[in-house]
Image (cartoon, rainbow, N blue to C red):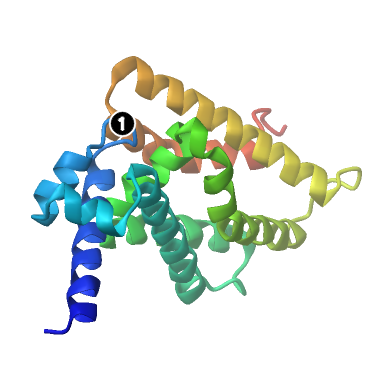
């Protein structure tokens, strides 16, 4: 086997081991030692190809968000009515995490518990995903009969504000109970209800 092929195989093994590690643990609780154990490689070999845990983590985050955007683009039919489109969007996300279970924890850890020293790098990685979801929201808001005094951009800003508040709440809950899986379950169980409240409010029509 040529050296170039050996290098490619070693890098692939390390990357796959990192996906498994970050798919099971947050950045803070993840371990280079475990990555080496999973990949059955030495620390020397690992550091030959990758500078540190930060580089591996960012590679995994990029892989997660790039894969997710591609999956949405392949499976989302945006010609549907806005109700069906939002429902389909959530169904696709569920199918994505079912197909790629390691991606779920990487995705949510990035949203609610990103390492602060990597915030700028993660923001750049998420840019395409954020633009995709922004455009999705805008297209579907244009399909809705919204109040005349409301602007699309203001609604999207409010949605983003609400999402950021929810992320902070989820992050705090993870810190309190130390069980991110349970928080994931709560998020998935309630997301449609929260969207319903966001879109229709809480006051009953007479």
Q: Residue 67: image x %, image y %?
A: 41, 65
Classify 10 Å Cα crowding around label 1: few (below 14), some (14-19), many (20 and above).
some
Residue extending farthest to the bottom is 1
The image quarter containing residue 179 is top left
Residue where numbered disc 1 is placed: 180
Could you say where residue 3 lies in the image, as x and y percent from the top left? 19, 78
Percent of width and height locating residue 173: 40, 21
Image quadrant containing the N terminus: bottom left
Residue lying at 48% horizontally and 43% vertically, measured from the top left: 192
Quick check: 122 above or below 128?
above
Q: Residue at x 39, y 50 (%)?
A: 55
49 vs 181: above or below: below
- In the displayed structure, does residue 86 sit left or right of residue 27? right
Q: Looking at the image, can residue 200 be seen? A: no
Q: Is residue 163 visible?
A: yes
Question: Which residue is located at x 58 percent, y 58 percent?
Answer: 83
Name the quadrant of the C terminus.
top right
Q: Residue furthest top?
A: 176
């Amino acid at each position: 086997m040529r050296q170039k092929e050996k290098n490619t195989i070693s890098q692939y093994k390390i990357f796959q081991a990192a996906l498994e590690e970050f798919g099971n643990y947050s950045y803070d609780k993840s371990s280079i030692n475990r990555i080496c154990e999973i990949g059955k490689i030495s620390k020397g070999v690992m550091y030959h190809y990758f500078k540190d845990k930060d580089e591996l983590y960012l590679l995994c985050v990029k892989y997660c968000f790039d894969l997710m955007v591609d999956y949405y683009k392949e499976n989302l039919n945006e010609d549907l009515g806005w109700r069906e489109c939002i429902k389909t969007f959530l169904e696709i996300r569920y199918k994505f995490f079912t197909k790629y279970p390691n991606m779920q924890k990487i995705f949510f850890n990035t949203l609610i518990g990103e390492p602060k020293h990597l915030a700028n790098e993660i923001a750049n990685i998420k840019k395409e995903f954020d633009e995709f979801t922004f455009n999705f929201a805008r297209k579907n808001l244009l399909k809705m009969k919204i109040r005349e005094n409301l602007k699309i951009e203001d609604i999207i800003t409010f949605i983003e504000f609400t999402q950021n508040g929810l992320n902070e709440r989820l992050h705090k809950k993870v810190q309190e109970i130390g069980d991110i899986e349970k928080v994931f379950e709560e998020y998935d169980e309630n997301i449609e209800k929260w969207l319903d409240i966001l879109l229709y409010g809480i006051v009953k029509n007479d």
